[in-house]
Image (cartoon, rainbow, N blue to C red):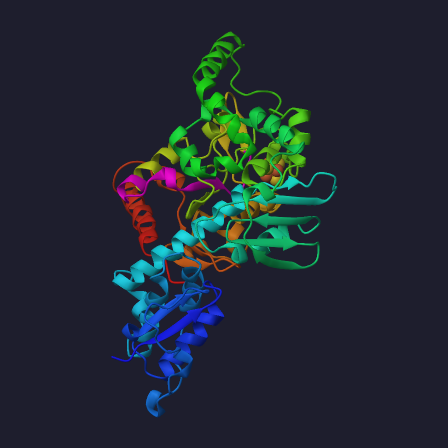
């Protein structure tokens, strides 16, 4: 069997891979005939270059592939698995030889593997966005360097995100195999560096640690989730990581102290004034980059609409910052308003049951609401839920957009008409679009279903069971999101 070699340099380049793959198809070179090489890697087989293979006259028109395949290939190429190059060519070969729909079969072994590689790259990219910490270059006011150790070839893929986010400063992100530079107007890339090339610390880190310690809530500590969201291997990049062992160790004692203080405090169900962050912590939050944590903290002081005033506190979303699925409800209810956490009241408990029945672990999801303050009408001692107006949804939109921007979920679920119209536009007709997949403006698939509180409002008996079954059937569709 004649063998050929195809070199992909740089190893994550879609253009380089595409040129080789086109040549392979044009010359009718089967997948098992190609020895794929990365960068300057030497060939063990000494096979001639694929570029020299004669194209056959009967190879026909070049294979046309879908946008979904190109997007998949772009991600897969960034993985470090050397088998990704033959895997992609094998998929392309199958598409070109009669299996055009192969990508829509998620059980196919090649598709399964390619999706897993792409998912790992997306996760690594997300971690880089979340855990890069710039340090000021000594003696320079607006120059910053960060050190990071990604698992895959993602520097070129993620660098444009930092260029947009930190457009006003000069920065470099150094990694062992590749570095990215931004001079304020131009993005460029270069070879890898060493950790010692980046500054070890800077004066702003003390500010960040102070801020982090001030917002750390021991009552909300979930160590397993925290380690999922912030894996230990990234701690070496994070200034706040030095605080974590102490904060985690002392959490139990601090919660007991909080309970003791609560027992002494006068019993009042609804605080007259909302809880405000301290001025120092608010100033510190303003100085921080737009992480999810910083946004959550800024939202505590939001006054963009009138809902903040009678409510107890802002109820921001919660869940892993790299959650693949984001669930969006309408607004916090009475229990959420008092606890400061989304979906903990009766509707949240029903949602938990539905998720469990659908085999979905709630701790893997990011849960939030279109509106972050509880709107209610007081009737005696009871606070009765009132639906937010369009102006409230509009005012709160930037918080929701910030959460989506930070989490970048693969899919979004709109629970109820308010969430659906917040994301899909005021013209969206809930009764027609419920139970179906839609597409957000950035291409993210969005499933629309009923809010669990609607299920609760059906009372007991057959109507309630039917409503429960409808919500469950919709949530199960998360197992098969549409191909993007
Ligand atoms: S509801 Fe949203 S926009 Fe209105 S005050 Fe609260 S956080 Fe701000």
Image spot of residue 149 (x, y percent): 49, 46
Give whichever of 117, 181 is nearer the camera.
Answer: 181
The image quadrant of residue 452 is: top left
The image quadrant of residue 106 is: bottom left
Task: Name above or below for residue 41 compared with residue 140.
Answer: below
Q: Quadrant of the N terminus?
A: bottom left
Q: Is residue 312 visible?
A: no
Please name the residue shown 44% across and 53% down the image: 152
Please name the residue shown 50% across and 35% down the image: 236
Image spot of residue 145 (x, y percent): 63, 44
Please name the residue shown 46% across and 65% down the image: 40
Residue 362 part of the magenta segment: yes
| Span shown in magenta | 355-373
Q: Is residue 458 left or right of residue 388?
A: left
Image spot of residue 260 (x, y percent): 48, 9
Give whichever of 267, 386 is nearer the camera.
Answer: 267
The image quadrant of residue 36 is: bottom left
Image quadrant of ligand 1 equals top right
Q: Quadrant of the C terminus?
A: bottom left
Task: Name above or below for residue 68 compared with residue 292.
Answer: below
Q: Is residue 58 visible?
A: yes
Task: Name above or below for residue 70 compared with residue 363.
Answer: below
Image spot of residue 290 (x, y percent): 60, 42
Residue 256 part of the magenta segment: no
Give whichever of 354, 121 is nearer the camera.
Answer: 121
Q: Is residue 166 left or right of residue 371?
A: right
Q: Is residue 219 left or right of residue 213?
A: left
Please name the residue shown 41% across and 47% down the image: 325
Give whichever of 257, 189 is nearer the camera.
Answer: 189
Which residue is the extreme one toward the bottom? 57
Q: Is residue 56 left or right of residue 294?
A: left
The mark total stands at 0
């Amino acid at each position: 069997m004649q063998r050929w070699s195809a070199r992909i340099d740089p190893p994550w380049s879609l253009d380089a891979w595409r040129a080789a793959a086109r040549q392979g198809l044009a010359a009718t070179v089967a997948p098992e005939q190609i020895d794929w090489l990365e960068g300057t890697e030497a060939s063990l087989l000494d096979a001639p270059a694929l570029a020299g293979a004669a194209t056959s006259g009967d190879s026909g028109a070049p294979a046309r592939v879908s946008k979904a395949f190109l997007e998949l290939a772009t991600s897969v190429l960034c993985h470090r698995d050397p088998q990704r190059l033959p895997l992609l060519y094998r998929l392309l070969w199958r598409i070109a030889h009669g299996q055009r729909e192969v990508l829509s079969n998620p059980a196919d072994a090649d598709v399964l593997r390619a999706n897993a590689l792409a998912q790992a790259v997306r996760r690594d990219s997300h971690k880089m966005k979340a855990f890069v910490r710039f340090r000021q270059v000594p003696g320079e006011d607006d120059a910053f360097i960060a050190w990071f150790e990604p698992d895959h070839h993602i520097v070129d893929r993620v660098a444009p995100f930092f260029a947009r986010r930190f457009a006003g400063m000069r920065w470099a992100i150094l990694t062992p195999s590749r570095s990215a530079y931004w001079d304020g107007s131009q993005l460029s890339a270069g070879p890898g560096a060493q950790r010692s090339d980046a500054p070890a610390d800077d004066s702003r880190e003390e500010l960040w640690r102070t801020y982090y310690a001030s917002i750390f809530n021991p009552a909300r500590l979930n160590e397993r989730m925290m380690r999922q969201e912030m894996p230990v291997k990234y701690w070496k990049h994070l200034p706040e990581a030095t605080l974590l062992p102490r904060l985690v160790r002392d959490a139990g004692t601090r919660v007991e102290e909080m309970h003791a203080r609560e027992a002494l405090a006068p019993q009042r169900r609804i605080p007259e004034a909302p809880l405000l962050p301290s001025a120092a912590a608010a100033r510190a939050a303003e100085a921080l980059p737009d992480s999810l944590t910083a946004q959550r903290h800024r939202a505590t002081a939001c006054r963009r609409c009138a809902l903040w005033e009678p409510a107890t506190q802002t109820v921001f979303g919660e869940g892993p910052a790299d959650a693949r699925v984001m669930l969006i409800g309408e607004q916090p209810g009475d229990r959420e308003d008092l606890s400061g956490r989304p979906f903990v009241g009766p509707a949240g408990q029903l949602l938990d049951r539905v998720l469990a029945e659908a085999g979905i672990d709630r701790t893997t999801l990011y849960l939030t609401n279109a509106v972050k303050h509880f709107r209610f009408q007081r009737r005696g001692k009871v606070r009765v839920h009132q639906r937010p107006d369009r102006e409230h949804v509009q005012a709160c939109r930037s918080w929701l957009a910030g959460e989506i921007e930070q989490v970048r979920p693969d899919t979004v679920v709109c629970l109820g008409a308010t969430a659906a119209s917040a994301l899909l536009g005021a013209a969206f007709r809930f009764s027609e679009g419920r139970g179906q997949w839609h597409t957000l403006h950035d291409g993210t698939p969005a499933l629309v279903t009923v809010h669990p509180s609607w299920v609760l409002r059906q009372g007991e008996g057959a109507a309630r069971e039917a409503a429960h079954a409808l919500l469950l059937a919709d949530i199960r569709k998360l197992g098969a999101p549409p191909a993007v």
